[in-house]
Image (tube, rainbow, N blue to C red):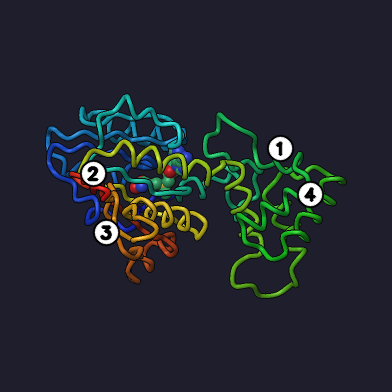
Amino acid sequence: MTQRHIPVLQKEVLGVLQPAHGEVYVDLTAGFGGHASLVLDRLGPNGQAFLVDQDQTALEALYDTFQADARVHIHRANFAEVDWQSIPSPNMVLADLGVSSAQLDDAERGFSFQHDAPLDMRMDQNRGVSAADYLAQIEEEDLATIIWQYGEDKKSRQIARAIVRARSMQPITTTHQLADIVRSQYPKGYHRIDPATRTFQALRIAVNRELDALETMLDAALAALAPGGRLAVISFHSLEDRIIKQKMRDITRDICDTITGQALQESQFRLVTKKPIIPAPNEIDYNPRARSAKLRAVEKKKITQKKEVL
Ligand SMILES: C[S@@+](CC[C@H](N)C(=O)[O-])C[C@H]1O[C@@H](n2cnc3c(N)ncnc32)[C@H](O)[C@@H]1O
């Protein structure tokens, strides 16, 4: 039985999005609609919500929950490929990144080594190559790079070598096979986190091209926001957070003359969160998934001024 997904940072998300009657909300990772329900409660009868997800199970749950609500429009898409022209300029955009508890708990999806299952890891089950096919084809050096960059595992080269050696004897098709190969490269005994965790994270990011999708999505969502609109993003690991932090910094910086330091053009955006908002300890107690969540937000200014160049 899959546990329903508990939305993270609920109060905090509402605090930065500030939903108001009649506004347009776009949820790029609608999942099981937890955040969407909270926002919809504040949109009144004339608000609209566009709920996007690429996962079939999430979409079915969204249809079940919202099909009777005429304010809600549900789209199946990767958030990097949303057709922004087809929706009104949003006042709020939310992206709550990563996998849902339901996806993790569903053994067949192969996201977690808690269950022995086919090594799939695709967020959109209808597209792309599975993690097993990906591992069967990748060169050892590229695999080491991925485990290093996306998993930040110091033993990346050693793990890549072990994977390539193992696959020459037998295809790696299950989560337990892969987890055992990774663990074999670490001394036996206690580890604070299972040594397989980082390689699984790396493989999931690579199979779903998660970081490329994040960058494309941020640019498109920022461009689409209505004046006064808010974009909030919740991330769960440092690679995502780094991209979000850098993007939000860049777009909220005025363009200055490099010699005089004088502002030439005021930035179009304002930082809503100077530092990332993290969950309170009691939230982590009842929802351990919230442990590494970080929320950042920006607002598109209502009017931007071009400073005259003297
Ligand atoms: C953490 S859950 C979101 C939960 C949601 N906020 C709620 O309250 O129920 C993340 C969701 O984002 C979806 N997702 C992740 N990456 C995506 C992408 N690139 N495009 C579309 N959906 C994506 C996943 O399928 C998953 O359903």
Residue indicated by mark 2 = 229
- Which amino acid is tagged 2? Gly
Residue indicated by mark 1 = 133
Q: Secondary structure at mark 4?
A: helix
Q: Residue furthest top?
A: 86
Q: Position of residue 105 (x, y in %)?
A: 51, 49
Q: Answer with left or right where residue 8 lies relative to residue 111.
A: left
Of 117 and 50, the residue lying toward us = 50
Of 273 and 154, the residue lying toward us = 273
Q: Residue at x 87, y 46 (%)?
A: 169
- Which amino acid is tagged 3? Glu
Q: Position of residue 98 (x, y in %)?
A: 47, 49
- Classify 53 as above or below 115: above
* Mark toward the start of the polypeptide (2 vs 4): 4
Q: Answer with left or right where residue 253 lies relative to residue 236.
A: left
Q: Where on the picture, by quarter, is residue 87?
A: top left
10 Å neighbourhood of mark 4: few (<14), some, or many (≥20)?
A: some
* Mark toward the start of the polypeptide (1 vs 4): 1
* Mark toward the start of the polypeptide (2 vs 1): 1
* Mark toward the start of the polypeptide (2 vs 3): 3
- Eye-nearest disc, 2 or 3: 2
Residue indicated by mark 4 = 140
Q: Secondary structure at mark 2?
A: loop
Residue indicated by mark 3 = 12
Q: Position of residue 80 (x, y in %)?
A: 45, 36
Q: Answer with left or right where residue 227 lies relative to residue 130.
A: left
- Label 1 vs label 4: CA separation? 14 Å
